[in-house]
Image (spheres, rainbow, N blue to C red):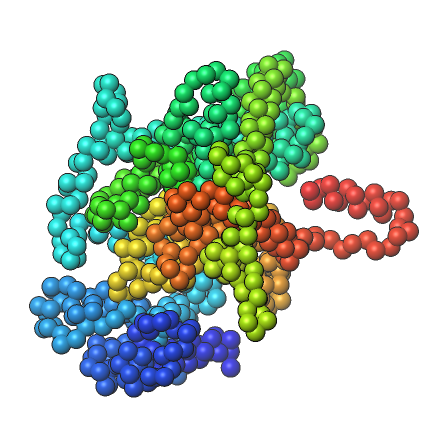
């Protein structure tokens, strides 16, 4: 039996099991609770597809059964071309049919008027898809992939074709389908009927587009406020990130390790905690505000609550990301080019301005784009510091959960937000398209970077040092705030906040009782983050392998579609998931699955970019040697590629784990009473004025993230590019050669 036949047999067996042995529709209480086994298979709510067809009148499932049998029949066709055609037909038709019947038939019957006109009224509808329907849909995608491989696609490599098809299928479901549902929702009434009035009313709302601030009015519309804030935040974080990168790489600053540590802290901090710390410093009862008020005898003001406070918090939060983007770019500028400029009698300032800085354009553009999108998507800081100056993310939230209860308005605001971010994403690609910034070639470059011009060096130190001090003070407030009884009123030291959040008691049987109020959301967050992190890394690195190593039609479009999900703000993802997955065919709201899917496809682009960068450094001859020795693509990835991608794996795991814990903009829409995430719970504490417990919870999260990041580092290990020299008495020439080899590899 060939590998291809074995894969096909397994896929067909899974498809038959999905239709015959698993509940076809969604089970109340969850599939993994296994409570459905008590009524299986006779109960209509838990019956498999075959009984839904035969006993419960769902006649349309006969088409799915016929297409699955067509795939079974194709298994016994010996001619690869004919078998491929049959499998491709069965798989493609089956996937499309399941999608269409799921969309067309709802709880009470036909969802579309045209369907009722063509086929007549249905006596009964259908619930959302369950384990059987979802698993059969995956099998149909695999059958289509095997059919394409039989017909010679990707040199007949079924694994590669299947990976591409499955990624396209998943991205279509979890990225494009929710966004499409959001656009459709903007034109729907509460009962789901088409009604453009809500869209027309909201898109023309003066509170969104007003420019009164330009003619002496109180404020501009929320769209322009958000856009201006995003531009200012992106500019500020990019400038500060560049200053940090220059100080870390081009100066003799004595505290470089401390500088790098400070840039990591905001990344592992829940996003709204920085805003909360600023409130403890500069709010009406803040330490700095009270000190200045007592010293100067002035009334404490509310200047922090508004766009100014949000801007300070966002720049503090997003500068580290800009620094991490820019430090590699600054270090990557070739010293030989700077030396050539000075050889031609250019001074250090002219060399920096005309040679070094232009070569940093890709990094600057990426840092600006990241700052812009992060500011647009930020929810926590505007919620804490916005006051009456709302931005698009908070307005979307209040349109859904507030007294307005206007899904159409939320969809329109999300569309505006998406328009801004995609425009910035496309503008960046157009600006950098067709330009070459390559300075690192295969030739050795042992020169040293030139020192910064004296005036520029003084300027960047004058920016970086006060900002470092300010960051230290902010984090001191975060740490100290968890140990005082009532901030600003009673600064008595206490452990009550930590005890209330994370107390542990004993049950009557002697076991541990998690009595703290934070334990439920804490364990839920850890569970979901630890599930989402490896899935995100796996999907991202597999996508990177396909982009770098495989050539197929539409590869550039495939890469752009995947990266575009990065440009979709979390707020838009959250509202689109609510609109897409709250009704058939896929109903996932209130479950852990929707949270995991959100994290995986929201954070996947970072794993893709990291994998592409790492894999581009691996010579293709490694793959070719493995394939020449008759290893298939899957074995080549597992045995050759993955061991050399350990740094990229670690980066993807760490980033996805941290983002799963610290995300709020999308999570705030998707949590439920059963699955409440830590960030959502802390927001509730802040809204109730329980600042001490909120800060204590955030401090514990930071400590846990540092511990888990170190664990990932140990688990994945380091990449080994050569055998270790285990002979202690090696000859000096051998040791010198090894050292030279290490330097070249580095």
Instruction: Between residue 471 and residue 716, name the one nearer to us.
Output: 471
Whole-percent x, y for residue 437 in the image: 52, 32
In the rendered image, which quarter is residue 631 located in? bottom right
Instruction: Between residue 440 and residue 526, name the one nearer to us.
Output: 526
Does 387 appear above or below 521?
above
Whole-percent x, y for residue 503 in the image: 55, 56
- Say whether residue 635 is left or right of residue 289: right
Q: Quadrant of the C terminus?
A: top right
Looking at the image, which residue is at 37% across and 71% down?
30
Looking at the image, which residue is at 23% across and 64% down?
103
Instruction: Between residue 519 and residue 121, name the one nearer to us.
Output: 519
Looking at the image, which residue is at 33% across and 47% down?
572
Whole-percent x, y for residue 176 in the image: 32, 53
- Say whether residue 28 is left or right of residue 474: left
- Say whether residue 81 is left or right of residue 261: left
Does 431 appear above or below 133?
above
Whole-percent x, y for residue 34 in the image: 41, 77
Does 680 appear above or below 474?
below
């Amino acid at each position: 039996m060939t590998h291809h036949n074995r894969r096909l047999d397994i896929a067909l067996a899974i498809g038959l099991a999905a239709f015959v042995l698993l509940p076809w529709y969604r089970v109340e209480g969850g599939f993994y609770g296994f409570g459905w086994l008590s009524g299986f298979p006779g109960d209509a709510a838990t019956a498999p597809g075959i009984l839904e067809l035969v006993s419960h009148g769902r006649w349309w499932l006969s088409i799915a059964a016929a297409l699955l049998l067509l795939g079974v029949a194709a298994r016994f066709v010996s001619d690869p071309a004919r078998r491929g055609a049959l499998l491709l037909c069965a798989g493609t038709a089956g996937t499309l049919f399941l999608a269409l019947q799921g969309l067309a038939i709802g709880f009470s019957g036909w969802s579309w008027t045209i369907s009722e006109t063509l086929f007549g009224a249905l006596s009964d509808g259908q619930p959302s898809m369950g384990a059987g329907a979802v698993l059969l849909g995956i099998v149909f995608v695999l059958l289509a992939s095997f059919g394409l491989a039989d017909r010679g696609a990707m040199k007949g490599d079924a694994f590669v074709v299947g990976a591409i098809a499955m990624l396209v299928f998943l991205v279509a479901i979890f990225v494009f389908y929710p966004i499409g549902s959001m656009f459709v929702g903007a034109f729907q009434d509460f009962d789901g009927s088409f009604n453009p009035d809500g869209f027309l009313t909201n898109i023309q709302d003066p509170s969104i587009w007003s420019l009164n601030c330009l003619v002496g009015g109180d404020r501009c519309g929320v769209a322009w406020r958000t856009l201006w804030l995003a531009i200012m935040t992106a500019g500020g974080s990019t400038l500060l990130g560049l200053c940090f990168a220059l100080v870390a790489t081009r100066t003799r600053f004595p505290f470089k390790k401390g500088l790098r540590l400070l840039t990591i802290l905001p990344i592992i901090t829940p996003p709204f905690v920085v805003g909360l710390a600023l409130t403890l410093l500069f709010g009406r009862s803040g330490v700095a505000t009270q000190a200045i008020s007592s010293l100067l005898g002035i009334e404490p003001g509310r200047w922090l609550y508004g766009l100014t406070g949000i801007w300070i918090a966002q720049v503090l939060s997003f500068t580290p990301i800009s620094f991490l983007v820019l430090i590699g770019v600054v270090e990557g500028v070739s010293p030989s080019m700077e030396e050539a400029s000075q050889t031609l009698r250019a001074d250090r300032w002219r060399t920096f301005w005309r040679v070094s800085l232009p070569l940093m354009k890709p990094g600057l553009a990426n840092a600006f784009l990241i700052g812009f999108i992060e500011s647009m998507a930020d929810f926590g800081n505007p919620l804490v510091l916005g006051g009456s100056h709302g931005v698009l993310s908070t307005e979307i939230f209040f349109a859904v959960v507030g007294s307005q209860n206007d899904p159409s308005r939320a969809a329109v605001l999300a569309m505006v937000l998406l328009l801004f971010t995609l425009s910035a994403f496309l503008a960046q690609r157009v600006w950098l398209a067709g330009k070459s910034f390559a300075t690192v070639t295969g030739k050795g470059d042992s020169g040293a970077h030139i020192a910064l011009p004296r005036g520029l060096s003084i300027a960047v130190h004058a920016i970086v040092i006060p900002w470092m001090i300010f960051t230290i003070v902010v984090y001191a407030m975060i740490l100290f705030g968890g140990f005082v009884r009532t901030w600003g009123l009673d600064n008595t030291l206490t452990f009550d906040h930590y005890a209330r959040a994370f107390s542990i008691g004993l049950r009557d049987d002697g076991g541990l009782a998690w009595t703290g109020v934070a334990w439920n959301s804490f364990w839920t967050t850890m569970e979901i983050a630890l599930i989402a992190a490896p899935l995100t890394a796996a999907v991202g690195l597999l996508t990177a392998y396909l982009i770098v190593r495989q050539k197929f039609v539409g590869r550039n479009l495939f890469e752009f579609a995947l990266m575009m999900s990065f440009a979709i703000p979390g707020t838009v993802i959250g509202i689109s998931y609510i609109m897409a997955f709250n009704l058939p065919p896929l109903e996932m709201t209130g479950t852990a699955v929707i949270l995991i899917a959100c994290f995986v496809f929201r954070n996947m682009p970072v794993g893709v970019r990291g994998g592409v960068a790492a894999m581009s450094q691996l010579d293709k001859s490694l793959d070719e040697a493995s394939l020449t020795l008759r290893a298939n693509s899957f074995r080549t990835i597992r045995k050759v590629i993955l061991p050399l991608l350990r740094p990229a794996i670690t980066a993807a795991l760490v980033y996805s784990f941290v983002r799963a814990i610290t995300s709020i903009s999308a999570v705030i829409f998707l949590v439920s009473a059963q699955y409440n995430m830590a960030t959502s719970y802390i927001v509730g504490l802040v809204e109730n004025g329980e600042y001490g417990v909120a800060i204590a919870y955030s401090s514990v999260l930071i400590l846990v993230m540092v511990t888990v990041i170190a664990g990932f580092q140990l688990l994945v290990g380091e990449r080994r590019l050569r055998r270790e020299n285990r002979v202690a008495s090696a000859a000096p020439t051998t040791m010198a050669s090894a050292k030279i080899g290490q330097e070249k590899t580095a």
